Image (cartoon, rainbow, N blue to C red):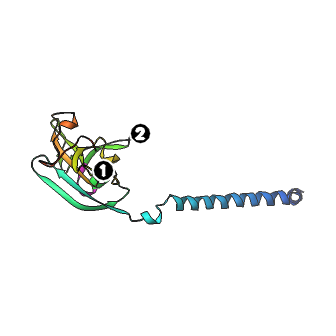
Amino acid sequence: MRPRLASNIIGGHKAVFAILFLVGAGIVAFQAGAYYYYQKSSACPDPCQGSIVTVEILLNYGNRTSQWINKTDVPSDWNFYQLTTSVAKVQATYYGPPTSEHLVTGINGVQTNGQYFWSLWAICEKSKAWFATNVGADAIHFTTYHTLAWYYQATNSQDSSMWNPPVDGAARVNAC
């Protein structure tokens, strides 16, 4: 008797089961379409695929030793921290959310200590002069600055307007 009861329940509600099946199939199809759309729309559009920016980097070790890394081609979505880690051995402390940034404590084995630290500089294009940036390397993208420097210098002042630029005798401005 039980098989007949199940057959009657299913037989009597074929339309309901058919509707449920079609709704379920529609939901699966919708989710698959949404996933495909998300994958295509979140990818970089065709014009930016392989977009490259050319930048120049100066590493000034503070002991009259400098290293220019000229005409470095990098992906346009990189920041200066990523670039630095690609051209030098970097020691840094990472500060997670909400800032998600790095404090660079060493470059190529030259470590920050109580008397010296690594400062970050950029060339201001409109004045053609160096200025100490007011943001960290993670916040510098290459849409604005194309010549940047790390300068290992004495901690004689917290006031960046008192610092010397990373190139001896170069022009300097306080802000860009």
Q: Report the quarter where the N terminus lies.
A: bottom right
Residue furthest to the front in view is 126
The numbered disc on residue 161 is none
Q: For the point 21% across and 48% down, which residue is it?
A: 129
Q: For the point 83% across and 56% down, which residue is it?
A: 16
SS state under label 2: loop
- Left or right, 22 with respect to 71, comes to right
Q: Nearer the viewer, residue 15 or 112?
A: 112
Structural crowding at the residue carrying mark 1, measured as other residues with C-alpha within 10 Å and reported as few (<14), some (14–19) or many (≥20): many
**Whole-percent x and y of residue 6?**
85, 57
Q: Which residue is mark 1?
A: 81
Q: How many numbered discs? A: 2
Q: Which residue is mark 2?
A: 98
**Whole-percent x and y of residue 110?**
17, 47
Where does the magenta region start and end? 86-90
Q: For the point 42% across and 65% down, which residue is it?
A: 49
- Left or right, 106 with respect to 81, comes to left
Q: Nearer the viewer, residue 18 or 81?
A: 81
Marks 2/1: CA–CA distance: 17 Å
Task: Tell whether position 2 is magenta.
Answer: no
Q: First in sequence, mark 2 or 1: give its number.
A: 1
**Whole-percent x and y of residue 113?**
17, 38
Q: Amino acid at mark 1?
A: Tyr
Q: Amino acid at mark 2?
A: Pro
In the image, residue 153 sits, relative to residue 8, either above or below, namely above
Q: Nearer the viewer, residue 55 or 21?
A: 55
